[in-house]
Image: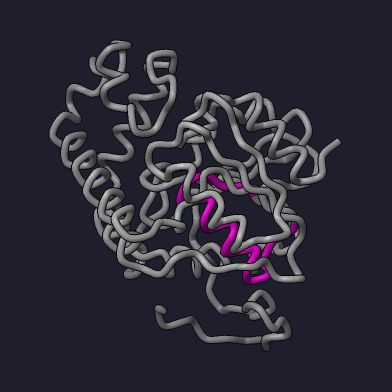
Amino acid sequence: MRPRPRETGTVCLTTGWCSIGYTRKSAIETSTQGSGSKLLLVHGLGGSGRSWAPIIPLLTEQREVITVDLPGHGNTPARADSGTFAGLADDLQEYIQQNDLGSNDIAGFSLGGRLVLEMARRGCAGNVVALNPGGFWRGWERTYFKWTLTASHKLLSALKDQLGTLSGSAVSRTALLAQLSARPWALDGPMVEKELVTFAETSTVVPLIKDLAKGPAQKGPSSPHAGRVSIAWGEKDRLCPPRQAPRARTAFPLAAFHWIEDSGHYSLWDRPEEVADIILEGTGSD
């Protein structure tokens, strides 16, 4: 784990550090929309806060939605350890604690899904919803994860100047997103272009892929200081296959579980209305 900043408080939770006070502000870029009780959203690997665009209008009808750019992603500068899961988890926890969000609801997908489960384990969140979370791979699945995503990053980096044209074609869009979406031909071309360019340009993607592939599996269960946990999984996820879902359920045995039909790894793209309902239900909205 990375060296931590100077503490000004004491640890009173047995499962985490949420009560520690830090002397420096966590420089994480955020965007806030809507009104109601706060809901923090955490994006996936190589994405940014705008990755949530397909469901933001559905959530802001009932909630004040805060989207973050993780360190090394979007508009948030990288830190020395932003190429590791532990570094991102510590930074997210630090941001939550410094902004008094430890009892607020939080949702994430992919890498963000794993991060919000880690916040639940540390007792640094209210109700938690994890969509297609990473961290539950075993054996050859680790190699598959590493090499397929590394190859995708190299390809997209090489094609960066052509991604606008490629994203505009249903045929090429389907080829580029076969691993992430169950219905790539039906997705919005400009949205896909933005996401693919962001993925290609995020400098921490390659070290994060290596760290995630070789690192330990996600641990559970959630802390008694956290709220309810919900986990949702796309039935056609080709990056974190459905066989991994039972491991997540074992790690977080009290979590509510949802299968998302006709959905790939990016379920918020494939089934935005259903995902918004899962988040609002899981975080206690009427």
Q: 213 or 69: nearer the eye?
A: 213
Q: 264 or 64: nearer the eye?
A: 264
* Placement of 243 over or under 218, stated as above or below: above
Q: Position of residue 119 (x, y in %)?
A: 61, 64
Q: Position of residue 215 (x, y in %)?
A: 36, 68
**Quarter of the image holding residue 165?**
top left
Q: Position of residue 220 (x, y in %)?
A: 60, 68
Q: Residue at x 70, y 70 (%)?
A: 223
Question: Which residue is situated farthest in the left direction here?
Answer: 158
Q: Residue at x 27, y 26 (%)?
A: 176
**Quarter of the image holding residue 253?**
bottom right
Q: 276 or 194: nearer the eye?
A: 276
Q: Residue at x 25, y 39 (%)?
A: 200
Q: Position of residue 95 (x, y in %)?
A: 58, 63
Q: Quadrant of the N terminus?
A: bottom left
Magenta residues (range)? 107-126
* 214 drawn magenta: no
